[in-house]
Image (spheres, rainbow, N blue to C red):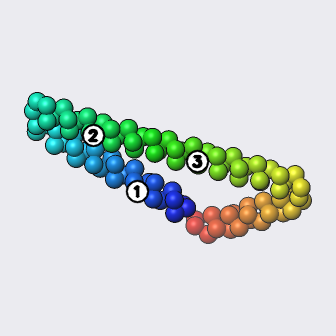
């Protein structure tokens, strides 16, 4: 996982943890203070959701780019791609065969 993705994941987790804490605190409060804490927690959750959606969009875009690159490579080097696939299959078969 790239460093930027790890940072965003950590930020999202922090936002979610903060929101959970605020909701727990709001449960023991009443009146305007409780409403204020709940509103702040809701904003934190919305921020986390937005960051998660941005991270998902970036991952989808990177996946598309990888697929296009792989497709171009296979079209340009079909026999090499077949040989690589066969080699990976043989190695995977050997590794899986040893586990039994």
Of tags 1 and 2, the one toward the viewer is 2
Secondary structure beneath label 3: helix
What residue did someone put label 1 on?
A: 10
- In the depicted structure, whether residue 83 falls above or below residue 66: below
Q: Point out which mark residue 58 bears.
A: 3
- Residue at 61 percent of width and 45 percent of height: 60
Q: Quadrant of the N terminus?
A: bottom right
Q: Is residue 10 above or below residue 33?
A: below
Residue nearest the observer in this picture, 14 or 1:
14
Front in this rendered view, residue 88 or 25: 25
Quarter occupied by the C terminus: bottom right
The residue at the point 69 percent across, 63 percent down is 93
Q: Tell me whether the residue at label 3 lies in contact with that at label 2, contact meaning CB atoms closer than 8 angstroms.
A: no
Report the Cα–Cα distance between label 1 and label 2. Answer: 17 Å
Quarter-of-image position of residue 73: bottom right
Q: Quadrant of residue 42?
A: top left
- The x and y percentages for residue 22 are 22, 43
Circles 1 and 3: CB atoms closer than 8 Å:
no
Distance between the alpha carbons at the discs numbered 1 and 3: 16 Å
Element on which disc 2 rests: helix
Query: Residue 20 in the image: x percent, y percent?
Result: 26, 44
Camera-side residue: 52 or 87? 52
Q: Does the image show residue 97?
A: no
Is 98 placed above or below 62 here?
Answer: below
| Residue for badge 2 | 41
> Which of marks 2 and 1 precedes in the sequence?
1
Residue 76, numbered circle: none
Q: Check disc 2: other Cα within 10 Å, few if <14, some if 14-19, many if 20+.
A: many
Residue 97 lies in quadrant:
bottom right
Q: Is residue 29 above or below residue 94?
A: above
In this image, 78 relative to 91: left or right? right
Q: Would you call the spot at circle 3 few (<14 residues within 10 Å), some (14-19), or many (20 or more)?
A: few
């Amino acid at each position: 996982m790239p460093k930027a993705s790890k940072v965003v994941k950590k930020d999202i987790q922090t936002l979610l943890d903060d929101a959970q804490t605020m909701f727990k605190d709001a449960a023991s409060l009443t009146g305007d203070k409780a409403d204020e804490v709940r509103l702040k927690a809701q904003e934190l959750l919305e921020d986390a959701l937005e960051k998660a959606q941005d991270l998902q969009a970036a991952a989808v875009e990177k996946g598309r780019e990888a697929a296009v690159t792989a497709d171009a490579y296979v079209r340009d080097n079909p026999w090499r791609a077949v040989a690589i696939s066969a080699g990976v299959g043989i190695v995977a078969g050997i590794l899986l065969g040893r586990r039994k």
